[in-house]
Amino acid sequence: MTKSSKIPESFLIDHNEMTAPQVRKAGVQSGPAGDKVSKFDLRFVKPNVGAIPTAAIHTLEHLLATYMKTHLDGVIDISPMGCRTGFYLSIWGDVESDMIKQALIKSLGQILETRWEDVPGTTARECGNYRDHSLFSAKEYASTILEGFKES
Ligand SMILES: [Zn+2]
């Protein structure tokens, strides 16, 4: 992706051809000081076939935001896609997708072991929609995604 490109890279890709789960390097950008930032598409559900319910993707967001940072240095952000089929991850440096995939597999494994009282940021003070969480459903998706990675 060039600096002058105004159309988000994701809109140029045929979503009907995407497979899930997969970790795809969406691009690398360079800042004025030469710093690099890599962006990844963490696709959990095949686009236009399924979508993760909001309560599940919300709890996945809280957990991945915490766990991914324990496995990777330099994570800037990990946020759910509006279509609810995956997440975007931004990280400092020119990073390879396999490193992200390994961290994701570890994080999803941790989610399966997480108790509700250990989900971070679930109070009204800490979250913008604290009632809309489902650890049960988040675990179901984590399990399905892990199975998908084993088969791929
Ligand atoms: Zn929240």
Image (tube, grey):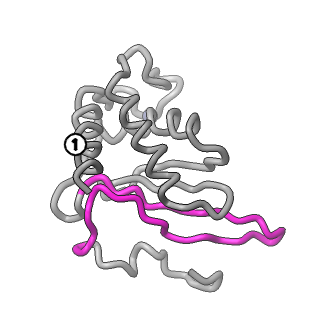
Q: Establish if 133 lies above or below 77.
A: above
Q: Position of residue 18 (x, y in %)?
A: 28, 69
Left or right: 120 in relation to 50: right
Q: Quadrant of residue 119?
A: top left
Left or right: 105 in relation to 7: left
Residue at 24% x, 26% y is: 136
Query: Which is more toward the observer, 18 or 99?
Result: 99
Q: Position of residue 113 (x, y in %)?
A: 35, 22
Q: For the C terminus, give its image quadrant.
A: bottom left
As for residue 146 lying within the magenta part, the answer is: no
Q: Establish if 115 lies above or below 107.
A: above
Q: Magenta stretch?
A: 16-45
Query: Which is more toward the observer, 122 or 148?
Result: 148
Residue on which disc 1 sits:
144
Residue at 52% x, 40% y is: 68
Q: Establish if 32 lies above or below 86.
A: below
Q: Quadrant of residue 134?
A: top left
Q: Residues within 10 Å of mark 1 (few under 14, many from 20)?
A: some
Left or right: 102 in relation to 22: right
Residue at 19% x, 65% y is: 48
Query: Which is more toward the observer, 146 or 27?
Result: 146
Q: For the N terminus, give its image quadrant.
A: bottom right
